[in-house]
């Protein structure tokens, strides 16, 4: 395991190998790969920022282009949207149109779910029964409402169901004073979605050639393993081999965090779960405080924060990592705070003491308002700090402000020689979003 004194070396290695433009204005006391967008400093009536991830796991060099393209599309290209839930084309278009953060973050997730390269929505991992069951959740930092679905079948975009649960809950109590649901699972979640106008999608149409071939390959491995010697050493050897071959590569949950024109934040996450999982298993993507978290600045919290996680669901559930990271970055130095949270609350968590490798990743956004008096006008700005960190071999991210012409993407990787699940990488940037106060 990398000690605290070694992180500087890790960060220098990551900075030297970064695939995107090098930082021009790092935050004070931060050793990470920080980048400040010059386009985002122009006073403008447009404001907003989105950061997405295509999972923490393993992203091969041969497929790097596809993963980056998925993240770019989630930020800036046309999404496949349902009915009246999301009126504009993509996350940034919605921010430019003045949409709330929760609408924009849902738009980003729809695009990520529709990609055959991600383990969410279309092309998700198949379970032991050869079925696709998905988890998703979304949280609105302004209202603190949350919506989630778990082990839902036959719905192409589970995040839309989670978002609809959130919006319905905001309307207040149901007839006879009943409390509206915020989290539904299985058949009940599917039926609720259909009754609220979200069309079903046959499971066979959600599987892709890639997910089907992966299922058949994993099934053969399981059948072979069951025929082998069941001795302790053999079992342990097989388990470690399986983790090396498939483990980190199957953890590609997707997610996004957003801040809008008004400074509201939102977060969302969606996943098809672990390959060959038991039917009915619900991962972190649906659990409160584990898959995502969003909270506007209020009371004793000076910053608005939004977090989305990826990785081994059981590890993320037992540590409630999304909420832990959100609380941590209320400290003055967000980079140092996130680094310590990933080390102390995740890798070295007493709740995961029995685990050899702790696999996961997070994207984090925090922001605060600032007003600058100019000779002729008042400029209202939002200072956005965004970070990602992971213990897996790699993590693919993309980000864009509503004032940028195109999205930026990056595949973050652990330095050579480090051990996934026992080491971590952390990078990020800073963006100033400006608008004229009339």
Image (tube, helix red, strand yellow):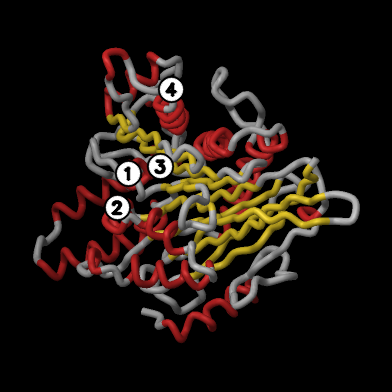
Residue that carries the numbered disc 4 in the rendered image: 171
> Which quadrant of the structure image shows residue 107?
top right
Q: CA distance from mark 1 to mark 4?
A: 22 Å
Question: What residue is pinned by disc 1?
Answer: 287
Q: Find the distance from the CA under tag 3 to the CA under tag 1.
A: 12 Å
Disc 2 element: helix
Q: Nearer the viewer, residue 383 or 248?
A: 383
Observer-side mark, 2 or 3, equals: 2
Question: Could you give the CA–CA distance between mark 1 and mark 2, rounded to whole angstroms?
Answer: 7 Å
Q: Is residue 57 visible?
A: no
On residue 56, the disc is none
Which of the two discs, 1 and 2, labels the residue nearer the N terminus? 1
Residue underneath mark 3 = 271
Going 32% across and 35% down the picture, which residue do you hit? 150
Q: CA distance from mark 4 to mark 3?
A: 27 Å
Please identify, in this view, whether the residue under mark 3 or under mark 1 is nearer the observer: 1
Viewport quadrant of the C terminus:
top right
Determine the CA span between mark 4 and mark 2: 29 Å
* Residue 121 visible in the displayed image: yes
Label 4 sits on a secondary structure element that is loop
Q: Which residue is mark 2?
A: 317
Return the disc, 4 or 3, that comes first in the chain's sequence: 4
Q: Secondary structure at mark 3?
A: strand
Q: Where residue 436 sits: x, y (%)?
A: 80, 45
Marks 4 and 3 close (CB-CB < 8 Å): no
């Amino acid at each position: 395991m990398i000690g605290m004194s070694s992180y500087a070396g890790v960060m220098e290695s990551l900075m030297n190998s970064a695939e995107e433009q090098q930082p021009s204005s790092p935050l004070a006391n931060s050793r990470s790969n920080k980048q400040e967008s010059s386009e985002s400093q122009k006073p403008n009536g447009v404001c907003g920022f989105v950061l997405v991830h295509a999972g923490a796991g393993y992203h091969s060099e041969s497929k790097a282009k596809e993963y980056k393209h998925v993240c770019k599309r989630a930020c800036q290209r046309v999404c496949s949207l349902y009915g009246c839930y999301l009126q504009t084309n993509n996350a940034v278009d919605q921010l430019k149109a003045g949409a709330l953060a929760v609408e924009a973050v849902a738009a980003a997730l729809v695009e990520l779910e529709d990609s055959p390269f991600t383990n969410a929505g279309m092309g998700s991992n198949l379970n032991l029964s050869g079925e696709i069951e998905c988890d998703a959740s979304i949280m609105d930092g302004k209202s603190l409402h949350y919506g989630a679905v778990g082990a839902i079948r036959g719905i192409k975009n589970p995040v839309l169901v989670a978002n609809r649960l959130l919006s319905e809950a905001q309307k207040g109590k149901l007839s006879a004073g009943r409390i509206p649901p915020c989290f539904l699972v299985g058949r009940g979640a599917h039926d609720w979605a259909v009754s609220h106008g979200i069309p079903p999608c046959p499971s066979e149409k959600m599987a892709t050639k890639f997910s089907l071939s992966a299922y058949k390959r994993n099934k053969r491995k399981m059948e072979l393993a069951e025929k082998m010697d069941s001795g302790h050493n053999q079992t342990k050897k097989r388990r470690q081999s399986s983790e090396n071959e498939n483990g980190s590569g199957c953890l590609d949950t997707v997610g996004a965090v957003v801040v809008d024109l008004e400074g509201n934040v939102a977060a969302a996450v969606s996943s098809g779960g672990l390959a060959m999982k038991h039917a009915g298993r619900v991962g972190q993507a649906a659990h409160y405080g584990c898959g995502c978290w969003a909270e506007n600045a209020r009371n004793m919290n000076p910053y608005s924060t939004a977090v989305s996680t990826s990785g081994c669901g059981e590890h993320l559930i037992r540590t409630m990592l999304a909420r832990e990271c959100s609380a941590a970055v209320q400290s003055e130095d967000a980079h140092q705070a996130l680094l310590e949270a990933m080390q102390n609350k995740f890798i070295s968590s007493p709740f995961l003491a029995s685990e050899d490798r702790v696999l996961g990743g997070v994207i984090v956004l925090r922001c605060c308002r600032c007003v600058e008096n100019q000779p002729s006008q008042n400029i209202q700005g939002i200072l956005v700090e965004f970070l990602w960190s992971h213990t897996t071999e790699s993590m693919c991210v993309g980000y864009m402000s509503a004032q940028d012409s195109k999205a930026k993407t990056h595949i973050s990787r652990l330095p050579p020689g480090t051990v996934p699940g026992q080491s971590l990488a952390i990078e990020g940037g800073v963006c100033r979003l400006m608008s004229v106060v009339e």
